[in-house]
Amino acid sequence: MIDLRSDTVTLPTLEMMEAINAATLGDDVYVEDPTTIELENLAAQITGKESALLVSSGTMGNLICNLVHCARGTETIMGNQSHTFLYESGAISAYGGIHSHQLKNNKDGSIQIDLIKDAIRTEDVHFPVTSLICLENTHNKCHGFPLKLDYINQVCSLAHDNNIKVHMDGARLFNACAALDISADSIVKNVDSVTFCLSKGLSAPIGSVICGSKDFIAEGRRIRKSLGGGMRQSGIISAAGIVSLNNMINRLKDDHANARHLANSLCTLNGMELNPELVKTNIIYFNFNHPNMSLKDIIAHMRSQGVIFNDYNGKHCRLVTHNDISSNDIEIVIDVFNKLLS
Ligand SMILES: Cc1ncc(COP(=O)(O)O)c(C=O)c1O
């Protein structure tokens, strides 16, 4: 199968399996797992933050960061297309009593600065206190767009002038780095916390990392434990994560080139509503509108030819390139689509 559903389907590389096998282990709840400590130090160094914490998933990372930044009954501003709002089971309100204030995402994943300004609550007994602004980078639902550095810094200035923190859901932070040719520490310099995933384009089997100040991470560690996320010999996970950070970041540009080539090749086919200009990283969205064929038909046909991808609400589709999709696979996908739709 050529699996374009998500970069989460990536399997660990041989080097990861060897690193897992050779990892030195200890009990990480006692902060005694040397491999996890090494991963966390490396993550802190790469993001330019004081400290870092391994967590089981991006969802857990975003939840912990919201729980550390926001007291119960306070409010987080986030995009209406953000992963935290759409796809994290309402965790911040379920477990933190945190009120989400959703604002419209632009096509590029940003939220208009004026909208954010207006959404920040004034002091009034009727209002919740605004504690946090969450940005997503790259933005999954918004074509995998990387946020511009100027924009991130503008949001941070606005937030900090109003005594509000900024969290970045950087599940695909390193895709943003690759797309904009900017280092991770520059992107997250002014945000108060960031979560990035090891288990997406970086191909590790499990894990995300939260980075922030020493005090922030200390509190995050306490909350992680309370959520049942304190892991014991977690070096098994961290060993693969170290390989991710050392060896898998530089190759993300290949995924972006594959996505661009795929988008350029598919956009002229019958029924395809796909704007290749919107493809900046490893995510392609298209709508399918064909006079004689339903999306269900093409998904079934593609599957029969060994190509799978996700669709949403019967019209909207996503293709994601990743380490387990070679440039040869891309040519096969183009060929199968071509035979069906040209
Ligand atoms: C932007 C974004 N944030 C967070 C997550 C959650 O990550 P996880 O699946 O590791 O919980 C995802 C998952 O796809 C994502 O795309």
Image (cartoon, helix red, strand yellow):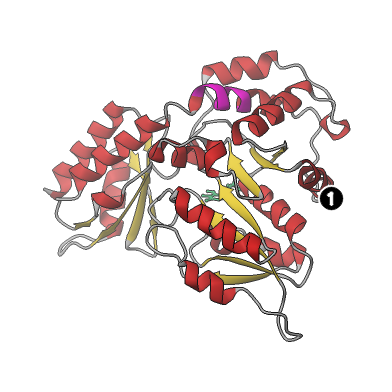
- The answer to which image quadrant residue 317 occupies is bottom left
Q: Position of residue 11 (x, y in %)?
A: 51, 29
**Percent x, y of residue 130:** 68, 70
The dominant secondary structure in magenta is helix
Task: Label 1: state its secondary structure.
Answer: helix
Residue drawn where x is 55% and y is 16% of the image: 15
Q: Relative to 227, is 133 on the left or the right? A: left
What's the residue at 16%, 47% (across, down)? 340
Where residue 336 appears, as percent x and y from the top left, is: 21, 40
**333 relative to 100 in the view: left or right:** left
In the rendered image, the quadrant that contains the N terminus is top left
Question: Residue 154, relative to residue 29: is it above or below?
Answer: below
Specify whether 180 is left or right of 126. left
Residues rendered magenta in the picture: 241-247
**Would you name the residue on which mark 1 appears?**
226
Q: Residue at x 51, y 22 (%)?
A: 247
Picture quadrant where residue 232 is located: top right
Please tell me whether residue 165 belongs to the stretch shown in magenta.
Answer: no
